[in-house]
Image: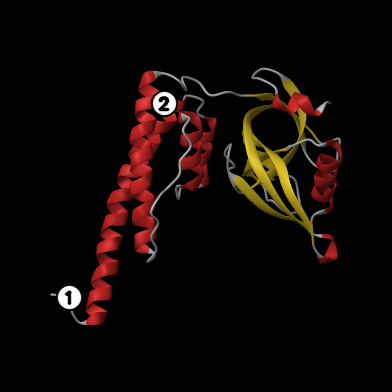
Amino acid sequence: MAREAYGARRRDMVDLPLFPLQTVLFPGATLPLQVFEPRYLTMIQRCLDEGIPFGVVLIRSGQEVGGPAVPFEVGTTARISTVQRAPGGRLHVLALGVQRFRILETSQREPYLTGTVEFLEDEDADAPETVEAAQRVGELFRQYTHLMLAVNGEWTRTIALPSRPGALADHVAARLELENRTKQRLLEELSVLRRLAVEQRLLTGALETLAHQLVGVRRLKYETMGIWN
């Protein structure tokens, strides 16, 4: 399969090496991996040799290491950015999430899992209401990040965010502290507007929690200094 096929549009189908993990990868996010199982070392070498991505899919049942794992149907292609070879044959891999896909069929013909997949595209990404929702979520996420840093005694002047609504939604989803099942639902949601609506609700709740945490952190600091009244 030519490597150009892996940048195909929705409904085009290709065979893709699959890497089931206990994590959800979003387009635009980075994924560091330590690869040591022989089957996945073989898979990574194939991707390097052929210049193709692999698919990251959240495990529905089973384990990352050892026996077979049953993945969710929707995942994200990952292109290898860097590889470092470590003693003992391990590989330190940094990959970048690129595009959503849906698994149509899986196969165990290779030592690792492969799948026939179709690529998925965002819906309603350029609608006016989506752009407005992205502006609201972007502002909420800036507040969230500033508060998160403040709780940990850190600070930043600027927070750069993607300009496109779909990329912004994925950026926020990748960085929110959420259970994997919640992240998977966001990955499976193709409507950018609906993803942003969920994130707006989650950020609003998270801001309230962080504000309370920050009050506690400052109270403890001032009590330690002996100036809290």
Q: Residue 140's quadrant in the figure?
A: top left
| Three-letter amino acid code of the residue under disc 1 | Trp
What's the residue type where badge 2 is placed? Leu
Residue indicated by mark 1:
228
Residue 98 lies in what quarter of the image? top right
Q: Where does residue 91 sit, x and y in percent of width and height?
A: 78, 56
Quarter of the rendering containing residue 65: bottom right
Residue 180 is situated, as x and y percent measured from the top left of the image, at: 52, 45
User: Which of the pair 204/3 is nearer the observer?
Assistant: 3
Q: Residue at x 37, y 19 (%)?
A: 128
Q: Residue at x 34, y 27 (%)?
A: 132
**Of residues 127 and 116, the one drawn nearer to the viewer in this rendering:** 127
The quadrant of the rendering that contains the C terminus is bottom left
**Across the whole image, how many numbered discs are drawn on residues?**
2
- Quadrant containing the N terminus is top right
Residue 113 % position (x, y) = 77, 39
On the image, the x and y values in percent for residue 3 come to 79, 29
Work out whether 127 lies above or below 80: above
Q: Residues within 10 Å of mark 2 (few under 14, many from 20)?
A: many
**Secondary structure under the numbered disc 2 in the rendered image:** helix
Residue, disc 2: 193
